[in-house]
Every structure is written in C-alpha cells, then in structure tokens.
Amino acid sequence: MKGIMQTSAGSIAEWQTADRPDPGPTVPDPGLAVCVRGLAKHYVHPWTLRVTRGLEALDLDVRRGEVMGLLGPNGAGKSTTLKLLTGLLKPTHGQAWLMGEPAESTASRRSLGFLPEQPYFYDYLNGLEYLELAAQLSGMQAGTARERARHWLGRVGLGERPRLGLRKYSKGMLQRLGLAAALVHDPELLILDEPMSGLDPFGRRDVRELITEQRERGVTVLFSSHILPDVEMLCDRVAIMIGGRLTRVATVGELVEDGAQAVEIRCAPGALLELPKHWVGLVSRTQRADESVFRLEDEAQLADVLGWLLQAGVQVRAVTPQRPTLETLFLAAAEAERERRSA
C-alpha cells in the first residue's frame, strides 16, 4: 500500500508540474477587461487520487465594453471558468486578469459585479436590507447605499414590496435580486452565471434590457447561458466550450458564414416530381395544402434544382435563404466534438 501511495503521489506531482502552458504576459493589454492565459482547474479525488480535468489550458480575451456569451453543455467548464475569474476557486495553473489586475488580488474585485449560478441569500433580511448590505460591502456610505438599494430594487421590478422577507421570494424574484446586487455599485465589469435561470419571458426581457443598458454605459459583460436566442440577441461575440476546452470564439455572423447556407424553394401545389437519387440527403420536399416546399441543405445545389423545377414546368413562388440559428450551430459543434472524442 505504501508503494502504491508513493507511486500515486509521484504521478500527481509529475502531473502538477509537467506540460504547463506558458502563463503569458505579466502585463495584459490595457484594452482587455478580461485576459486569461493557460488557465486550468483539475480536481483530485481524495480516495482514488483520480484526476478530473474541469478546465484545460484556457486562453480567452474579453475586450472592454463588449458583451461576450460563454456557451457550452452541462459540465463544459463555464461555471468553473467564472469561479476562477472571481476568486471562488484557485486555478491548478495559468493566470487571469480583470480590468488589468490579477484575478487573485482584492483590487480586481473593486470594479466587478458578479451573479453566481446559485446565489446565496440571507433569509432573515428583506430585499431592501439585502441590497443595502451589498452596496455597503462595495464601499458605499450608508446614505448612498440606501438610495442605490431603493433604485435597483425598483429597477428589477421588486420595488412594490421592499420589506418582503427573502424567505418569501420566488426563485425568479431571487434571481432579479441577485442581479440588482451585482449592479448596485455601478461595476465596470459584470460577470453573470446563467442570469436567465428561473425567469419567465418577462423576466428574461428585463434582463436583456439591463444588459443592453450596461453595454451602452460602457460596461463589459461576460455571461454564460443555455438560452441561445438570448445570447444571439445580446452578444458581440460568443465563446463555445465543450469538455473543459475552448473550441471557438467568434461573432454569431462569423459562425453563420462558416456553415453551409440552406435554401427553401416554395412552389405552387402539385409539384410531385420524384427527386433524383443523387440529391437524396441534400434536397428534401414537404407537401403542404397550398404549396410544395423544397429544402436544399447547401445553396450550391440551387442552380441545378431550380433548372430541374423550371424544366418540369413547376411554378416557383419564392427562393428564401435559411439562416442557421445559434442553437443549430452550437448543437453541430457539440456533436462534432463528441464524435472526435469517441473516435
């Protein structure tokens, strides 16, 4: 047993020191709100000593004033990344800076607003008291803190019952309160972990408006979300994470341009032509009550399909490009990564 433990301990020591990425610059670009170089987080099981890699060699830049969405399935490393940036976890190796300050320093928190995925609240406080506490912990004087607390309680739609105890709040109300606490001190950098979680459509709309307001104010926003339409509407860029690794950083437009452009051809009813065999899997047909619809998975076939339809005397009503959604692109990226890992 002693020999086994020595061997395991030796393996861990070798793993901790071997192949570490270069930590990067000691002074980050002043134009970056978030600068990450080689950031990793590994967990060692206390009994089996098995190493689980929660985050691996992350390099990420978030420019000042932009809104970046962090996307990925459960277990992709999104929450781990945000906890490392905010000091809730210590990295295995690598470095990060927030607003030019090392992420592990107290100075990096002064201009930071943070909403965790599962925020903790003091149930014996009411909404106004909680926001006053958050404001004073951010360095505000009591009078200013009270004024800011009232403002933000109303701004997130909770101002009608300021004395309601938090134990009586619904999940959506707590989510709104947590967002208000992250914004009460006017931060320059806002980090939000699943800010839409537990919100109804009206709540999601309000959060989108708040994020848009912060962008217009020049605040940098980094947030994770599973609600891809909201990400598509809000973000300047998106970072896709799968299996603890960053797979892509791009604008939504760049992601769309990378994929094949599908096309929909709407025709007059009765276009019951049999598709040529070489188009199977590339062209599909749907028969509706008032029209026939042909869908091309790649616009490269458009000229051939149109020529075939016109030659057959079919009346073509419309040709419409089908822009892929962020959800479609994300699912395709996740499936490709899953296939790569299983190969």
Image: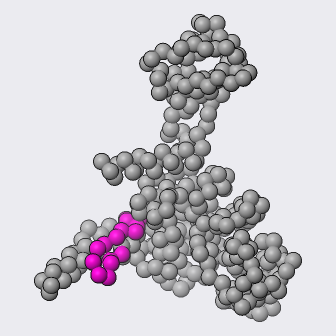
Reply above or below: 126 against 66: below
**Residue that extends furthest to the left in the rendered view of this protein:** 3
Residue at screen point 47% across, 81% down: 104
Helix, strand or loop: magenta stretch:
strand
263 is higher (above) or lower (below) than 171 = above
- Residue 24 visible at all: no
Q: Quadrant of the N terminus?
A: bottom left
Highlighted range, magenta:
43-60
Q: Position of residue 167 (x, y in %)?
A: 72, 84
Q: Position of residue 135 (x, y in %)?
A: 71, 85
Q: What color scheme is it?
A: one colour
Q: Is residue 85 left or right of residue 134?
A: left
Residue 265 sits in quarter: top right
The relative height of residue 168 versus residue 28 in the rendered view (above or below) is: below
Q: Tell which of 137 and 243 is nearer to you.
A: 243
Residue 314: quadrant of the picture: top right
* Left or right position of 95 against 143: left
